[in-house]
Image (cartoon, rainbow, N blue to C red):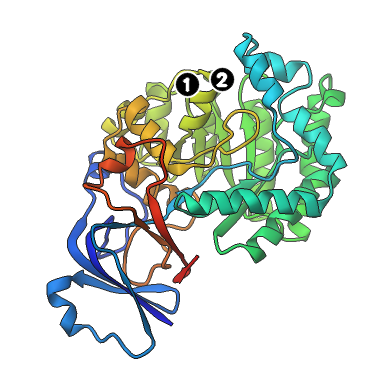
Amino acid sequence: MALLIKNIKKLVQIEYGHKEKVCGKEMSEIQTLDDAWLKIDDGKIAAFGRMRDIDAMKEGNETRLLDASGRMVFPSYVDSHTHLVYPASREIEYVDKIKGLSYQEIARRGGGILNSAKKIQEISEEELFESAMERLEEIIRYGTGAVEIKSGYGLTAESELKMLRVIRKLKDSSPLAIKATFLGAHSIPMEYRNNQTAYVDLVIHEMLPRVADEGLADYIDVFCDQGFFTVEDTAKILEAGLRYGLRGKIHANELDFSGGIQTGVKYNALSVDHLEYTGDAEINALLNSETMPTILPGAAFFLNMPYAPARKMIDSGLPVALASDFNPGSSPSGNMQLIVSMASILYKMLPEEAIMASTLNSAYAMGLSDQLGSIAVGKKANVFITTPIPAYEYMPYYYGTNKVETVILNGEVV
């Protein structure tokens, strides 16, 4: 059944042509349409226009009508970096952080990622699936229409495959657009701490072939940072991934200037993510590349870390994407409305820039900007209708409450 949304106060982030991504000052130039209508048919955006011209549009007998008076319509958020398949929360480590332990100190004593990895081995695929589905339903209510989910809490071949099979089942069961990323190189297991090369070999020669054989991943990722995987490790893993047709998406420069950004660019990674430590050399490496710089405000906020220089990156002409980093240890929230607020409050991004970064540019970071991230004819109809709000700037301004009233995914009200 077709769907017609009428009397839209403002249709936000429209496109009359398709753009892959938006860079620099153009990020502040979003297009809107006042007093609008939006037609959805066969799961896609079919047409839109002003209410004064609606008589020229044929509704059809099978068209469902929605009245959006006083409300705005946005493209759904695209969350291009999460770890939302996990076995249990880690609030005890949260208390350790309050007491003064650093992320690295918790990791060195077997906490953090290794804590989740131990529990992954003990939990069933069905339990993992059910808990992840609850999180997906939660982020849908906050306006997310697409999400990337990583493995990385397995750190053994069987546990990594378990996670990726759960993600495949989520793809089949959820209305969200989902991409799976193989992150076997998320941390070094305790038994390999004195022989990191052997673990890199395990990722490349045992895990990766099995992941590829089952077709479980869309991308491959490496945590290239201080105390985790080196530039040399990262290069080997990315090269191996490319041999299996898996493009890179890199955790880079969260903890220090690691060389991860430059390595990501060298191997044409789709995105480099975190970026708390980004200077002129890193910005210059990213300029004119096909790699999307992706900032994860939730992690820097939760860990009380330096904030990535988003303002400098945009002013230098770079594109920027935003994602939640939803995970149990360093960003236990998938609320993209909150991420957009953080982008404006903490990173000094204009509301328009934050909207662009959480829609079209983050869709690029998932390889989906031809399908999602803006309201354009032919794109997938993943949109949301807000509660009555005065202006689109109200979205980042009025933080802490859910301003999404109606969610439409694949052309269906959910």
Quarter of the picture holding the N terminus: bottom left
Quarter of the rendering containing residue 227? top right
Asked whether residue 228 appears in the rendered view, the answer is: no
Asked whether residue 155 appears in the rendered view, the answer is: yes
Residue 255 relative to residue 48: left or right: right
CA distance separating discs 2 and 1 = 7 Å
User: In front here: 74 or 356?
Assistant: 74
User: In front here: 218 or 322?
Assistant: 322
Instruction: Answer above or below: position of 327 versus 307.
Output: below
Q: In the rendered structure, are the residues bearing label 2 and label 1 in contact, judged by CB atoms less than 8 Å apart?
A: yes
Residue 58 relative to residue 277: left or right: left
Marked residue nearer the N-terminal end (2 or 1): 2
Q: Residue at x 40, y 45 (%)?
A: 358
Q: Residue at x 53, y 37 (%)?
A: 264
According to the image, label 2 marks what residue?
Answer: 255
Q: For the residue labelled by badge 2, is the local secondary structure a helix, a strand or a loop?
A: loop
Instruction: Say few, some or many: other residues with alpha carbon within 10 Å of mark 2 (under 14 / 14 to 19 / 20 or more).
Output: some
Kind of residue at disc 2: Leu
The dot on residue 21 is none
Residue furthest left as drawn: 52
Q: Residue at x 57, y 37 (%)?
A: 250
Quarter of the rendering containing residue 378? bottom left
Instruction: Answer above or below: position of 134 versus 353.
Output: below
* Residue 194, image x, y percentages: 84, 19
User: In front here: 236 or 378?
Assistant: 378
* Residue 245, image x, y percentages: 64, 56
Kind of residue at disc 1: Tyr
According to the image, label 1 marks what residue?
Answer: 277
Instruction: Say few, some or many: other residues with alpha carbon within 10 Å of mark 1 (under 14 / 14 to 19 / 20 or more).
Output: some
* Residue 275, image x, y percentages: 48, 28
Residue 21 relative to residue 292: left or right: left
